[in-house]
Image (cartoon, rainbow, N blue to C red):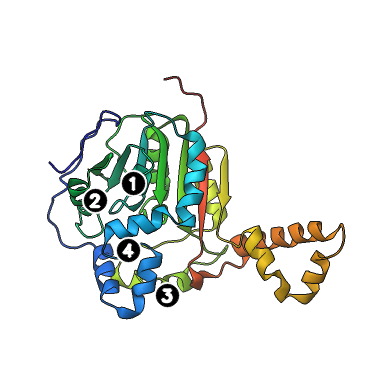
């Protein structure tokens, strides 16, 4: 059986996980990158190397996952219903399962290389509290208000219809539930992302790569009903900023002033955040942000 059922998960009508089809653009891009010796660091940094178990192990110990899990942790409880939307081959689902969580993993790509087929095969040989479901985020096969937490990693900027995808996630999330979207590409205001597409190694293979201004994400989340909404990432955090501050002699001297130095440091970092996240986005570096949002309301079990 290709799906692993769990009494902790909402029922769904999964698609055929073994469905055979021509390789998706994403699968073709990953296969090509794996064959390119110069792209091995890129693959490892994005956890796309062939050994899924090894990739999950590295990701589970990464600062990226640590930050995401620290955000999710206050919302976690026994019997939690968690959806990993656009799960790919299940990298995050398996990392969350390693923390003792039961996860429903939705992915439309049936690929046994980068899609839900790969996750189903892994779960067969490595029993995990993960339920792989082949389904489209734009039409999720779940009833309203059935998940406590929805998570996605580098998914929203791939959707053909971001607004519809957000509305579907809002629909299946319970009132008071948390939505965490990580690693979403951003571009500067009034730019169309040409430098971003040129720099992205998967775009040449027909992968639907997009990017939005940070405030566009915020507005689309708000219009879908989420509130409050917070953005993080995409820029140097304060500690990283301080580590590089000495490269600007005048700024560094101001930051070392008695009493006022700390205020100058916070001011300069705030300016850095505004400029790099909203104004001068360096598209060729493929910067990303993450979004934390809540579906308003109170939920009674």
Circles 3, 1 touching at the beta carbon (< 8 Å): no
Circles 1, 4 touching at the beta carbon (< 8 Å): no
Dot 3 crowding, Cα within 10 Å, few <14, some 14–19, many 20+: few
User: Residue 119, which numbered label?
Assistant: 2
Is residue 225 visible to the viewer in this orientation of the structure? no
Identify the element where label 2 is drawn: helix
Q: Earlier in the sequence, mark 3 or mark 1?
A: 1
Using the rendered view, name the quadrant where residue 233 is placed. Answer: bottom right
198 relative to 294, above or below: below
Circles 4, 3 touching at the beta carbon (< 8 Å): no
Q: Earlier in the sequence, mark 2 or mark 3?
A: 2
- The N terminus sits in image quarter: top left
Q: Nearer the viewer, mark 3 or mark 1?
A: 1
What is the spatial separation of the Cα atoms under label 3 and label 1, in whole angstroms?
30 Å
Identify the element where label 1 is drawn: helix
- Name which residue lies at 30% across and 67% down: 206
User: Residue 164, which numbered label?
Assistant: none
Q: Left or right? Give the position of 253 relative to 27.
A: right
User: Which residue corresponds to mark 1?
Assistant: 93
- Name which residue lies at 61% across and 68% down: 280
User: Which residue corresponds to mark 4?
Assistant: 48
Circles 2, 1 touching at the beta carbon (< 8 Å): yes
**Residue 199 place in picture, x, y as percent:** 43, 74
Q: Earlier in the sequence, mark 2 or mark 1?
A: 1
User: Which residue corresponds to mark 3?
Assistant: 198
Is residue 209 visible to the viewer in this orientation of the structure? yes
- The C terminus sits in image quarter: top left
């Amino acid at each position: 059986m290709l799906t692993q059922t769990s009494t902790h998960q909402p029922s769904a009508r999964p698609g055929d996980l073994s469905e055979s089809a021509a390789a998706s653009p994403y699968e073709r891009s990953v296969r090509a990158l794996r064959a390119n010796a110069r792209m091995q660091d890129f693959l490892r940094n994005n956890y796309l190397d062939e050994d899924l178990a090894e990739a999950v192990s590295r990701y589970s110990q990464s600062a990226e996952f640590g930050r995401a899990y620290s955000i999710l942790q206050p919302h976690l409880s026994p019997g939690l219903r968690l959806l990993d939307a656009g799960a790919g081959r299940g990298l995050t689902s398996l990392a969350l399962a390693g923390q003792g969580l039961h996860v429903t993993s939705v992915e439309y790509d049936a690929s046994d290389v980068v899609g839900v087929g790969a996750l189903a095969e892994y779960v067969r040989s490595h029993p995990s509290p993960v339920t792989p479901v082949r389904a489209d985020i734009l039409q999720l096969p779940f009833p309203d208000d059935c998940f406590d937490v929805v998570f996605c990693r580098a998914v929203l900027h791939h959707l053909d219809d971001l607004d519809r995808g957000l509305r579907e996630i809002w629909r299946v999330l319970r009132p008071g539930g948390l939505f965490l979207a990580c690693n979403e590409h951003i571009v500067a205001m009034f730019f169309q992302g040409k430098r971003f597409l040129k720099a992205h190694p998967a775009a040449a293979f027909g992968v639907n790569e997009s990017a939005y201004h940070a405030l566009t994400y915020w507005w689309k989340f708000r219009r879908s009903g989420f509130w409050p909404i917070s953005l993080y990432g995409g820029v140097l955090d304060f500690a990283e900023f301080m580590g590089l501050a000495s490269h600007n002699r005048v700024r560094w001297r101001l930051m070392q002033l008695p009493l006022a130095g700390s205020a100058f440091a916070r001011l300069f970092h705030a300016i850095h955040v505004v400029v790099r996240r909203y104004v001068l986005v360096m598209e060729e570096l493929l910067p990303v942000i993450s979004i934390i949002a809540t579906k308003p309301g109170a939920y009674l079990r």
